Image (spheres, rainbow, N blue to C red):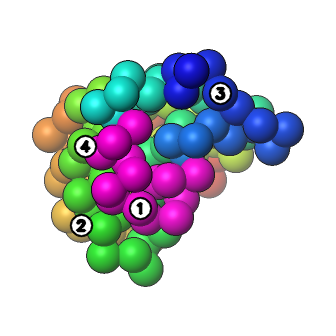
Amino acid sequence: MLKYFSCFKGKNALIYAAERGDLDLVKIMVNHKANTEFINKENKNALFYAIDNKENKESLEIIKILAPLSNVDVISKEGDTPLTKAVERQLIQIVEVLLENNANPNIKNLKNS
């Protein structure tokens, strides 16, 4: 069921959990085979939402769980990848995790950064 769930906003339950920074819920959903490859209408996966939630102390742990299971090089409609978004926000630990999970450092965003 979790594998195919999405709502009218184009977010699945895993994206909502990552967006909220709910580490326990992310763990439960991944353990129950939630679709970590799900891409919403903005062409974003759960990694983007965990990165956007940089204020939450659980975001790094969530990204450590999701990065090996997700497309780390997905390009959003805005032209960002999770890596370019993390670099833009100066999230060094997250950049390291994404690179350790084979994020391509040569993909440029629309701003050419």
**Residue 31 or 73: which is nearer the viewer?**
31
Judge whether residue 23 is colored magenta.
yes
The residue under the point 54% across, 27% down is 2
| Label disc, if present, on residue 5 of the rendered structure | 3
Q: Which residue is mark 2?
A: 92
Q: Give yes or no for contact between labels 1 and 2 (Cβ–Cβ under 8 Å).
A: no
Task: Return the x and y of residue 51 as percentages of the image width and height.
Answer: 44, 59
The answer to which image quadrant residue 101 occupies is top left
**CA separation in Å, label 1 and label 4:** 12 Å
- Amino acid at dot 4: Ile
Q: Which residues are magenta?
A: 16-29
Tell me if mark 2 has few (under 14), some (14-19) or many (20+) residues whose alpha carbon lies within 10 angstroms of its own.
few
Q: Are marks 1 and 4 in contact (CB under 8 Å)?
A: no
Residues at marks 1 and 3, CA–CA distance in whole angstroms: 18 Å
Pointer 1 local density, CA inside 10 Å: few below 14, some 14–19, many at least 20: some
| Mark 1 residue element | loop
Q: Position of residue 68 (x, y in %)?
A: 24, 31
Label 2 – label 4 distance at C-alpha: 17 Å
Classified by dominant secondary structure, the portion drawn in magenta counts as helix
- Residue under label 1: 22
